[in-house]
Every structure is written in structure tokens, then in C-alpha cells.
Amino acid sequence: MKKNFLSGLALALATIAAPLMAHAGSLDVDGNFADWGVRNNSSVAGWTPNAEVLFTVEDQSNANGGYLSPGWGGQAYDAEAMYLTWYTKADGQTYLAIGMITGHDPATATTGNSFGRGDFAIDFGHDGIWDFGVLTADRSATLKQGDVVSTTNSNWATGLWSAPGVYDPENSPYVTHVSSGSDVGNAAMAISGPFGNMGILGGSHWFYEVEIPVVAFGTHWQGNNPSESFDVQWTMLCANDILILDPPVANVAEPASMALVLGALGMGGLVRRRKTKT
Ligand SMILES: [Ca+2]
Ligand SMILES: [Ca+2]
Ligand SMILES: [Ca+2]
Ligand SMILES: [Ca+2]
């Protein structure tokens, strides 16, 4: 009897765990995107990740005079694709994972007419205020690569453009890298070496892979799922090209899945009880 109940409970727990993990199996932060389902196989389909991953693709090239929006630079400044998922690990901690592919060499120095890599920016609540930065490079004596930094917009440097095609660094609204703010956590981060065969437009590409413990987001993230909508942005220090991913919270499958699972669990309990009677 007791054994039957325990094996039934284990089965039910496995059923509950399955949809959470299926929504987003945990990833290896190793700079390799195979675990996201992305492939560099010289096809358009290669950009498309596993079904549960939210993503945006904006692959451009040196065509159109290298115009990217809001600036220029062709493949060398092309922000190409962003991927997003979140998952809860066995230790109960939930993580937000970001993947990003760009034609911008992470080793690009900021000097003269060249501009280095920027930070990931997160705006919870869609209010135009960038609440967190995830640093892709050391920005000060205390704010280092991998730090999650609580910010307001005044903590951010901005790019060269005030609007698409309008060179006006004094009035740029496009945030690029964190200059100051409060260190509130540590993300795991890996940046790949160069690779080819991504999509059909050619060029070299690099992959950024980031995993952020959501406890760093404080009240902006409660439990296993985000408690409000948010944007994730990445660009380089000139903001020649900008990727923004806006994951609609309505897309989050967990509440519906959990309802189904809990329903199934209830039914499982009924079946178990009937079996016990007979
Ligand atoms: Ca990986
Ligand atoms: Ca490209
Ligand atoms: Ca682009
Ligand atoms: Ca905000």
C-alpha cells in the first residue's frame, strides 16, 4: 500500500516536472548554441531554435550601403538574433537565459571609428526605464563582466544616433553599456570564438550565452515565472544596430500546463484510490 502510494506520487511529480523542463530545459553556458536548437548549417532554418525558446532574428549584411538601423556598419556591426528562455533547476533556483548572435567581433576595440561590445539591458514593465544591465565586459573598478547591475537610465551610456539614420550622440536614446549602478548579482556568461555558415548572408559570427539567477531581479520576478512583461536589448557601444526581444508574458505556457498537470494529478489520485479499493 505504502509502496504503491509512493510510486504513484513519484510518477505524479515526474509529470509535474516534465512541462516545466520542456518549456525550457536548462542550458550549458559554454558558448555553444546546440542546446538552444540553433544550427550554423548555411540555411535560414538554422536561426530557428527549439520550440519553447522565444526569439527574434534580424540577419543583415553589407547590402544597402551597410545600413542596419539606426546606424551603419554592415556585417561587422550586425546584431543578428536573440534567444530567451527560463527554467528552474533542481536546486529550486530559477534562471533567465539569453542567447545572442552577432557579426560584431567581441574583441573590437573602442577607438576612432570602431566601437566595442555593449551590455544586455532589461526593462521590466515596458516603461522605458532600463532596470538592469548584465555586463559583457568590465565597466569600472567594481562593475565587472558577468555582474547584474540595478540601473536607471542615467546609469547607461548611449549611442551615436537620436533616431534611425540621424547622427546625434548628444541626444541618443539608445542605451549601450552600464557606467554605474548597484551590483545585485552574478550571471554566468560565455562568448564563443568566431564561426561561419550562419544563415545565408555569410560573414563571421559570435555567440553570447548568459544565465541570470532571477533572484537578482527582486520583486520584478516572483516564483518560476516573470511577474510582469519585460524587454531585453543588446547593441554595441555605437548602437549601430539594436536587437530587442519582447517576450509576451501571455506566451508563458506554465500556468496552463500546470492546470492540466494538476488536473491529471487529481485524476491520477482517483485512479489510484479506485485501484486501492479493488
Ligand atoms: Ca550552450
Ligand atoms: Ca548578418
Ligand atoms: Ca541586424
Ligand atoms: Ca522598467
Image (spheres, helix red, strand yellow):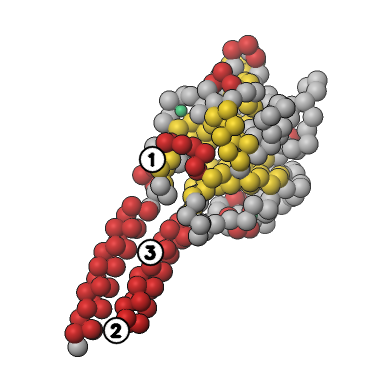
Residue 268 located left or right of residue 138: left
Percent coordinates x, y for residue 95 in the rendering: 52, 48
Please tell me which residue is depicted at 59% across the width and 25% down the height of the picture.
181
Most extreme residue toward the bottom is: 278
The location of residue 197, given as percent across then percent down, is 71, 52
The residue to which callout 1 is attached is 227
Q: Is residue 97 visible?
A: yes
Which quadrant would the N terminus be assigned to in this image? bottom left
Q: How many marks?
A: 3
Q: Alpha-carbon neighbours of circle 1 within 10 Å: few (<14), some, or many (≥20)?
A: some
Position in image of residue 84 (x %, y %): 53, 46
- Residue where numbered disc 3 is placed: 16
Q: Would you call the spot at circle 3 few (<14 residues within 10 Å), some (14-19), or many (20 or more)?
A: some
Task: List the residue tagged with mark 2.
Answer: 1
Mark closer to the chain start, 3 or 1: 3
The local crowd at label 2, few if under 14, some if 14 to 19, many if 20 or more residues have their Cα within 10 Å, is: few
- Badge number at residue 55: none
Q: Which residue type does callout 1 highlight? A: Ser
The kind of residue tagged 2 is: Met
